[in-house]
Amino acid sequence: MGAESSLRSRFERGLAAPICLTWELTYACNLACTHCLSSSGRRDPRELTTAEAKSLIDEIAAMQIFYVNVGGGEPMIRRDFFELIEHAVSRHVGVKFSTNGTRIDKESAKRLAGIDYLDVQISIDGADAATSDRIRGVGSYDAARRAMENLRDANFGRFKISVVMTKESVEQLDDFEALATSYGAELRLTRFRPSGRGVEVWNELHPTLEQNRGLYRWLLERPNVLTGDSFFHLSALGSPLEGLNLCGAGRVVCLIDPVGDVYACPFVIHDEFLAGNVRDAGFAQVWTNSELFRSLREPGNPGACASCGSYDACRGGCMAAKFFTGLEMSDPDPECVFGHGEAALAAKHVSIRPISSPDHSRRIPVTLASR
Amino acid sequence: MSQAIVDAFDASQYWQLSEKVSLRDEEFGALAYHHVNRRLIFLKSRELVDVVRRLGDFESADDAVNSLVAPDQHDRYVTALAALEKSALIRGR
């Protein structure tokens, strides 16, 4: 699905409704992954009620938003989880939900298998327990594998195995592919951003330039591996990767958090990217009228990238990756494939790296593998 | 698009918009999302959107195209429908 440039510029000016949106159902989580993009752990007492969540789904359906990416926290922790996703699919709103798999026992696997228009994405961060558990906590890999087995046994069909690309996991691409094949599952790889708690481990865990080049070549040969359009910064290396290849924040996607706050994208849960709250006058009002979203739909300023011949391919990269590494929006992406981002970071005498404003991390850490 | 895809599409048959697809009007035409194969498809003209929406009202794709678009556009629209069939956006009986 290569979008031609006229269509892409149309998307950059924003659509009347998002193509899809991410909805973090809860900040509660039974794991404490070191790179959690939403700094999850504790439930927020202001979480949307079941009634509020259902009326939000009705509004999403009325706006003809094709699907919602449901996440968290761990979405299955919400007692009304099944009620909400069944409500969504009954309104013809597709659901893709991301889970750590700990709550997918045999019974819930069967229930999930009975729901049409539902995608399940089980997250792991390594192709073996040692690698994955270093990020996600002891026992998390085995729990995810049990969930995969339960989905397979329940004949769920093609679920997805979702992996964030870190310095370690990017070395195991072929193993992930083999694992997905063994379950008849699809593989989904996404970019690691310095968002949420990820800001603290990004320097240590993000892939090197050489690893990103290898990843790009690997993905080019495998158009069936899903990426959620998240590696468009790598398209500067040559042929574009599958997807729209643009930053959709506030233009064709956005994020709704568990308390109804609307942010530009899942990777910028920060006051600076807060557009409004669905409790005030509904979601459509925020999407259409938010000053922040209107400004994101203005033509972008190539800034430092203006003189680079590849700006048209990568569009300057990811807003969230720049923001949380202390770069300006007019700077190159910190993982610019030509090294311009690293140079921009090195040239800063003082770099101030913002941390995500809402932090629901647990104050007493859960058991984590020693690092 | 390859000639093989066009050749494989039988415009003399009945076709209709798949019920697995959500179609949303946009300024440039429409966005279509297939809920099973998860593909997002761009329909880049209002006229094509109209043909796709009303396809099921006609006995065949040829009938639909002949009734809804100018004769010199016939082949272009059949080619577009062939591509949409390939993406499972439209289905037969």
Image (cartoon, coloured by chain):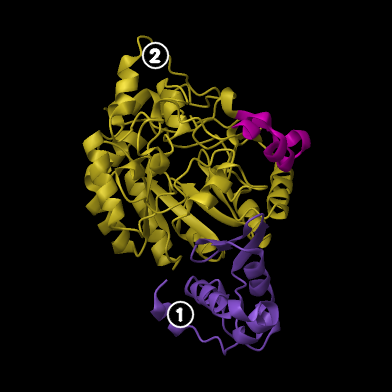
What residue appears at the point 70 percent right and 46 percent down from the top-left corner?
A: A56
Is B68 rendered above or below residue A268? below
**In the image, what residue occupies the spot 62% across and 31% down?**
A295
Q: Residue A238, how many percent across, how many down?
A: 30, 47
Whether tag 1 and tag 2 are in contact, CB under 8 A, the answer is no
According to the picture, the residue beneath numbered tag 2 turns out to be A351
Q: Which picture quadrant has residue A328?
A: top left
Which amino acid is tagged 1?
Answer: Val
Q: Name the residue under label 1.
A: B6
> Which quadrant holds the C terminus of chain A?
top left
Height in image: A152 above or below A312? Answer: below
Residue at horizontal 46 percent and vertical 37 percent from the top: A30
Distance of mark 1 from mark 2, alpha carbons? 56 Å
Q: Chain B is drawn in which colour?
A: purple
Tint applied to chain A in the drawing: yellow
**A165 or A224: nearer the eye?**
A224
The number of callouts visible is 2
User: What chain is tagged by disc 2?
Assistant: A
Q: Which amino acid does label 2 sit on?
A: Ser
A98 versus A330 height, above or below: below
Query: Would residue B87 be found to the left or right of residue A137 on screen?
Result: right
Residue A164, picture quadrant:
top left
A253 left or right of A92?
A: left
Q: Residues within 10 Å of mark 2 (few under 14, many from 20)?
A: few
Task: Tell me which segment is drawn in magenta.
Answer: A274-295
Q: Is residue A201 part of the magenta span, yes or no? A: no
Which residue is rendered at x = 21% and y = 37% of the image?
A: A210
Letter of the chain that mark 1 sits on in the rendering: B
